[in-house]
Amino acid sequence: MKNYNKIKHGWFSEICPICPGMSLSLEIEEVLYSKKSQFQQIDIYKTKNHGKILVLDGIIQLTESDEFAYQEMLAHIPLFAHPNPENVLVIGGGDGGILREVGRHDSVRKIDFCEIDEDVIKVSKQFLPDLACGFDDPRVTVHIADGNAYVREKINRYDVIIVDSSDPIGPGEVLFKRPFYKGLKAALRHNGIIATQGESFFLHKEWAVNLVKITKELFAVRAYAYILVPTYPGGHIGICLGSLGPGLKKPCRHISENIQSRLKYYSPKIHEASFVLPYFAQKMFEAV
Ligand code: SPM
């Protein structure tokens, strides 16, 4: 039986199978939702200091206090690296945070959004309206489907694909494997870019290295960036990127004041800086 990291003495502790020997705890005020969907246990907690949090199968997916860092960087790095993103696919991230960020780009004409668990979308609309605010955008089509199967049927379709996966355990596991990445590549148009949740170069070396290995095999242009997120273990998380043409490490379009003024983490400077890795991580990825 799975351990869903029950709350003890008012504290929720994440016990993540891929972070052995450590745990991240948040003080909880109230359980707002707790139910098992067809795919996973979904919990929404009201915390004392971090707003509401979304927890899937016992793993923190986001807190209202710092979600902007992850959503902005995973969305805007590939979108600003692309000269003219029009067709975008988002896989995973039923909370809608990535969708909210993609929707800020006027060049984007169509957004396909593929999420395996419809209940995550429903629960996020109910409890996390500041994240799940992009679903009514007329450019968005929601597909309730397995991202791996969905992408296999799409050829030469997207300018940017963003994969906002949970960890490589449970429904997210397949999204960390080579066949899925081959599907992503085939689904890209000329000059297309992919960006995927890349785990931690400190804590999940094996997973991060494997993702870098796959992108090196498939993409002539590839890179790994990282984001500071206090409520993920280790306080950071990676982004693994691959491109069929454009460089990734600098924005290639101007960011309008209209967009920049609404953001809290992303800027052209942090875009570039996020690719500067600690020396051990740089060497580790170079050796792949
Ligand atoms: N839109 C937010 C969804 C978050 N997706 C990524 C979650 C990763 C959580 N794991 C962090 C590292 C190890 N437990």
Image (cartoon, rainbow, N blue to C red):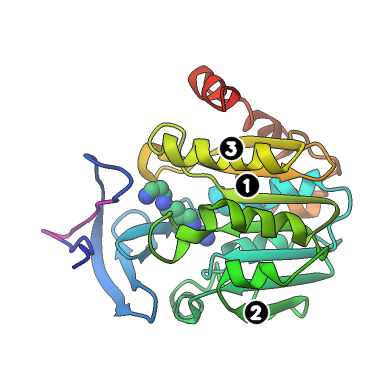
Lateral position of residue 255 relative to residue 279, left or right:
right
Label pair 1/3, CB-CB below 8 angstroms: no
Judging from the image, what secondary structure is the residue with disc 3 in? helix
Label pair 3/2, CB-CB below 8 angstroms: no
Ligand 1 rendered quadrant: bottom left
Q: Which residue is mark 2?
A: 142
Instruction: State which tag comes first along the sequence, 3 or 2.
Output: 2
Residue 258 lies in quadrant: bottom right
Q: Amino acid at mark 1?
A: Met
Residue extent of the magenta highlight: 8-16
For the C terminus, the image quarter is top right
Residue 264 percent coordinates (x, y): 61, 47
Judging from the image, what secondary structure is the residue with disc 1 in? helix
Q: Amino acid at mark 3?
A: Val
Judging from the image, what secondary structure is the residue with disc 2 in? strand
Gap between marks 1 and 3 measured at Cα: 18 Å
Mark number for residue 240?
none
Q: Is residue 283 magenta?
A: no
Residue at 33% in and 46% down: 18
| Mark 3, other Cα within 10 Å: few <14 / some 14–19 / many ≥20 | many
Residue 225 percent coordinates (x, y): 60, 36
Q: Is residue 111 visible?
A: yes
Residue at 25% in and 70% down: 30
Q: Amino acid at mark 2?
A: Val
Q: Which residue is mark 1?
A: 73
